[in-house]
Image: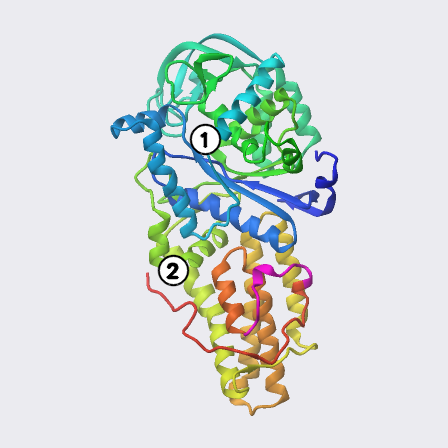
Amino acid sequence: MIGPGPARAIRRRWSWGSVRYRAVSKYYITTPIYYVKDAPHVGHAYTTVNADALARWHRLIGDDVFFLTGTDEHGQKVARAAEEQGLAPKAWTDQLAPRFASAWAELNIANDDFIRTTEPRHAGAVQHFLSQINDNGYIFKDTYRGLYCVSCEQYYGEDELVGGGLCPIHRTPVEHLEEENYFFRLSAFEQKLIDWYEANPTAVVPESKRNEALSFIKGGLRDISITRTSIDWGVRVPWDDRHVFYVWYDALINYLTAIGYGQDEGRFETWWPAVHHLIGKEIIRFHCVWWPAMCMAAGIEPPAHVQVHGWLLLGGEKMSNSSVNQIAPGDLVAEYGVDPVRYHLLRDIPLGSDGEFSAEGIVSRYNSDLANNLGNLLSRVATVVGSKCEGTGPAPSSDSRLASIAATVVAEATQAWNAGQPNLALEATWRLIRETNAELEKAEPWKAEPGPAVDSVLGSALEVLRIVSILVVPAMPASAEEIWRRIGLEGSPAEQRLPEAGIWGGYPGGRPVEKAAPLFPRRKV
C-alpha cells in the first residue's frame, strides 16, 4: 500500500471511516479540479472547505502537508461555453479560473498550490505520463462510435441512459459521436484492479463506494477512448499531433503534475503514492477505476486513498453548474461571515453522506453553537475576569472537573479528525464548551467575592477556551485566532502542536483578558 523510503516512514495509526491503516508524516490531500464552464458555487465550496479543514488538522498534528486544488480547463464543454461567449477558450478560462482562486481566498482556504490544466507544466506531465502508457503497450488506435454527454465529458452505454436516452447525471440528451481515437486498454486491468482492491481494503472509502467501484470492475471493463480529433482544445498527443487528449485523461494527471512528475522525480517520490483524493460520488468511476488503472499502466503505484463524499443538496437537488440552484460562496460569506459558513458545511453535513443546505440551517447552527455556546462562553468569561480579577486571567485548577472532560474530548476529536469525520470532531469539541458553560452556571462566579474559588473557576474556563481555540483551527481559523488573542495568549493557535498542546494546564495565567463585542452576535433567518 505505502511504498518504502524515509518520506513514507510510519508515524501513527490513521483511519478513514471505520477502517484503520498506518499513516505517514507526509500528508498530500487534493480536491477535484473544477470545471471552468461557469463560476464556483457552494457545492464546490463544500469539497474545498473539507479538504482545507483536513489539511489544517494535519498541520496541527505535525504532519508535512501539501494541499492541492485548481481548475480543469480543457474539453468540449469548455470550448462550447467559450464559443457562446464569443471568446477563444484560453481567453474564457483566463477569466474564470481566477474566480475560483478568489472564492477560495474568501473562504480562507490555505491551499499550497493552485493548478490550471492550461499551464505548460501540466501539458508536459500529461505528455510524459501518457507516453509511458503508450510505450508500455496499453494504447491503440481505432474508430469509436458511442453516446456522449458533453456536460459529463463521458461516453455512456445504452443501458446506462435514463428517461429514453438522457444522461443519468444531467438528465440531458446525449450525442452520438463517431471519430478516430486512441484507446486505453482498460480491459487489461480488470483482474489487476480486483486484486488491488482486495489487497488494499481502505483504498476507497466509505465501504459502500468501494463496493460500488469494485462491482463496476467485476461487471467487465471495456477499453476507453482517450483522444479527440473533433476538437483541438486540449493537450496534444506527442506521437500524433492531430489528436488531443480526452479531458478526463488530462485532468486526472494534475495530481502528478503538482508534485513534479516527469520533472522532479525526488519530489514526486516524496509525495506519491501517499495521496488522499477527496471527491464527489459522481466521479467515482474516473477516480476509482480509470485512475488506478492508468497509474498501473504508466508503471507507478495507484493513489493510496480516495475519500468519496455525498452531494450538497438544495431543495433535494444536487448543486451543479448545469442547474439553477447555484449559490456563490462569496454571497454566503457576505451574509453570514467566513467561519460560520465553514462551520455549517463541516458540522451539519457528514463527510460521505448527502446533506441539505439552507439558510435556515446556517442560522440555526450559528445561533445554537456559535452565539449561544462558544460566543457566550467567551463573553461571560471575559466579563467576569474583568469584574472579579481586574482583567487578568488566573491560571487553571489542576483538579477541575473540566480537566478530565477536556482530556476525553481532545481524544475523541483527534480520533474523529483522523478518521475524516469533521462533524463528529466538532460535536465532541462543543460538548466541552457546553460542559464549561454548565460549570459556570453552577458556580456563578459573577455573584461571588474575588478570591481563590473564583480564580479556580475562571482559570479553568480560560484553559478550556485555550484548548477549544486549538481544536477549532481546522474549521474556523480566524475565530480561533481571535479567541486566542482575547484571552491574552501570544503567537497563534495554528502554531500549536497536538497532542502536547491539548494537555490540561497550558494556560499560564497572569495574561490580560479582553472584553469585546460578541464574537458571534445572534442572527435572524
Task: Report the quarter where the N terminus lies.
Answer: top right
Query: Which circle's residue, 1 or 2, is located before the other in the chain?
Result: 1
Image disc number at residue 117: 1
Asked whether the viewer can see residue 318, the reply is: no
Q: Is residue 386 above or below residue 275?
A: below
Q: Main secondary structure of the magenta part?
A: loop
Question: Which label sits on residue 363?
Answer: 2
Magenta residue span: 488-500
Q: Is residue 274 left or right of residue 368?
A: right
Q: How many marks?
A: 2
Disc 1 vs disc 2: Cβ atoms closer than 8 Å?
Answer: no
Mark 1 or 2: in front is: 1
Say what amino acid the circle numbered 1 marks: Thr
Farthest top residue? 142
Q: Amino acid at mark 2?
A: Val
Measured as percent of width and height from the top left, residue 457 is found at: 60, 81
Asked which secondary structure carries label 2, the reply is helix
Tell me residue 77's x, y (percent): 35, 26
| Residue at the image position 62 percent from the left and 18 percent from the top | 189
